């Protein structure tokens, strides 16, 4: 048997993975009595599993490495080829993708979970490129990633990708109210108000009696009346993300000044009535000893969530007459 050739290409995580070429004629069992000939492309293996000499890795080691590499790098070169190998030779791993997605649909609040969900959806789309549900879920995942308090620094890229996938979903189901609403939301955040208006008008016209469209109608009325945000909310979110970066680096004055500017010149409190925004605003004010302003912000948090532990503790620290 010939010596297995290691690929000269570099994997996206060279410490964890290495590429290699399967020896000519190597096949994998597909479970139905058939054999799948491995393509002549670089295949990922965990670095510790790269075979020496003429040895080859077990089918399990190859499948595990392909699966994990795709989950981490779903946009990699040869992704479609890797997915096809999994589909034919490792269908149980494809089933596992679906099971993970079901879990992540419920527990998707952390950035890492949303990113994992995005990766899994991209893998599934290699199998069903025109699946409306997958396309819509991917656009929605990028939307929620863009608005996540811990990922605001990347809101521009996330919303751009969200719209791309939602538009692809719209081509499959142009009459889906939920998709039209969400792509309208993305346009609104990015300051594309005319396009948002068109999408929301379509959504309202297509809505069924059981659809909950009152909030959507309120937003549409706002656009039709010309009551636009002072600044596109995407920029407000980006600046909030920058303020968080200052805060995390201990630059409390810069964080406070940036948030104060957003309150004064972008109507932050009314445009982004979010618990995380109000809480962070309170933290910045507390750090510069603006206790009255901090108290106001933390109280706004408790009005939205009476049990918010961080805000309750903060109010106990700075409440008037408490020390």
Image: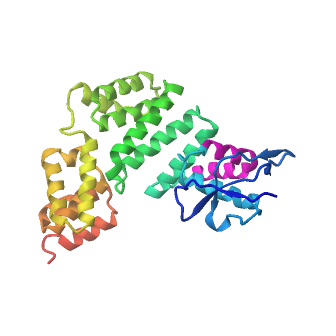
- The vertical placement of 35 against 225, above or below, is below
Please state, as top left, top right, bottom left or bottom right, where the C terminus lies in the image: bottom left
Relative to 1, 235 lies left or right: left
- Residue 74: percent from left, percent from top: 55, 48
Confirm whether the magenta stretch covers residue 240: no
Which residues are drawn in magenta? Answer: 80-103
Res. 315 visible in picture = yes
Q: Quick check: 238 above or below 2?
A: above
Q: Residue furthest right?
A: 33
Residue drawn at x 53%, y 46% is 75
Determine the main secondary structure of the stretch shown in magenta: helix
Q: Residue 113, position in %: x, y?
A: 49, 56
Residue drawn 12% across the image and 63% down it: 292
Q: Answer above or below: position of 208 versus 155.
A: above
> Which residue occupies the extreme front position in the image?
2
Of the pair 189 and 212, the residue shown nearer to us: 189
Residue 103 appears in the rendering: no
Residue 85 on the magenta span = yes
Q: In the depicted view, which residue is nearer to us: 192 or 304?
A: 192
Give the quarter of the image for residue 5.
bottom right
Percent across and percent down for residue 14 are 54, 61
Q: Does 42 sit left or right of 307 as displayed?
A: right
Vertical arrangement, residue 162 with respect to residue 145, above or below: above
Q: Quadrant of the N terminus?
A: bottom right
Viewer-side residue, 141 vs 40: 40
Left or right, residue 59 beside residue 174: right
Question: In the picture, residue 39 is in which quadrant?
Answer: top right
Residue at the (22%, 58%) spot, across then down: 281
Residue 313 lies left or right of residue 202; in this view the side is left
Provide residue 89's location: percent of width, then percent of height: 75, 49
């Amino acid at each position: 048997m010939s010596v297995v050739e290691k690929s000269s290409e570099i994997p996206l995580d060279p410490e964890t993975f290495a590429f290699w070429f399967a020896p000519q004629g190597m096949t994998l069992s597909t479970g139905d009595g058939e054999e799948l000939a491995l393509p002549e492309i670089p295949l990922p293996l965990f670095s510790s599993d790269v075979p020496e000499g003429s040895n080859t890795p077990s089918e399990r080691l190859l499948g595990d490495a392909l699966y994990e590499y795709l989950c981490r790098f779903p946009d990699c070169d040869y992704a479609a080829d890797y997915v096809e190998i999994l589909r034919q030779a490792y269908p149980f791993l494809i089933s596992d993708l679906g099971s993970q997605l079901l879990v992540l649909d419920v527990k998707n609040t952390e950035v890492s979970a949303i990113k994992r969900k995005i990766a899994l959806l991209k893998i599934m789309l290699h199998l069903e490129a025109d699946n409306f549900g997958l396309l819509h879920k991917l656009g929605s995942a990028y939307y929620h990633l863009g608005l996540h308090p811990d990922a605001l620094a990347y809101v521009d890229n996330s919303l751009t990708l969200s719209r791309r996938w939602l538009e692809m979903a719209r081509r499959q189901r142009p009459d889906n109210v939920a998709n039209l609403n969400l792509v309208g939301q993305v346009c609104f955040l990015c300051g594309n108000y005319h396009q948002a208006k068109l999408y929301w008008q379509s959504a309202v016209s297509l809505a069924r009696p059981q659809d909950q469209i009152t909030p959507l109608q309120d937003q549409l009325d706002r656009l039709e009346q010309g009551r636009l945000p002072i600044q596109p909310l995407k920029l407000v979110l980006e600046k909030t993300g920058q303020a968080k970066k200052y805060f995390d680096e201990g630059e409390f004055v810069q964080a406070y000044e940036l948030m104060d500017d957003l309150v004064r010149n972008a109507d932050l409190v009314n445009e982004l009535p979010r618990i995380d925004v109000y809480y962070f605003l309170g933290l910045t004010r507390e750090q510069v000893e603006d206790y009255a302003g901090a108290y106001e912000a933390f109280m706004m948090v408790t009005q939205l969530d009476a049990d918010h532990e961080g805000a309750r503790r903060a109010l106990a620290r700075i409440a008037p007459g408490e020390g």
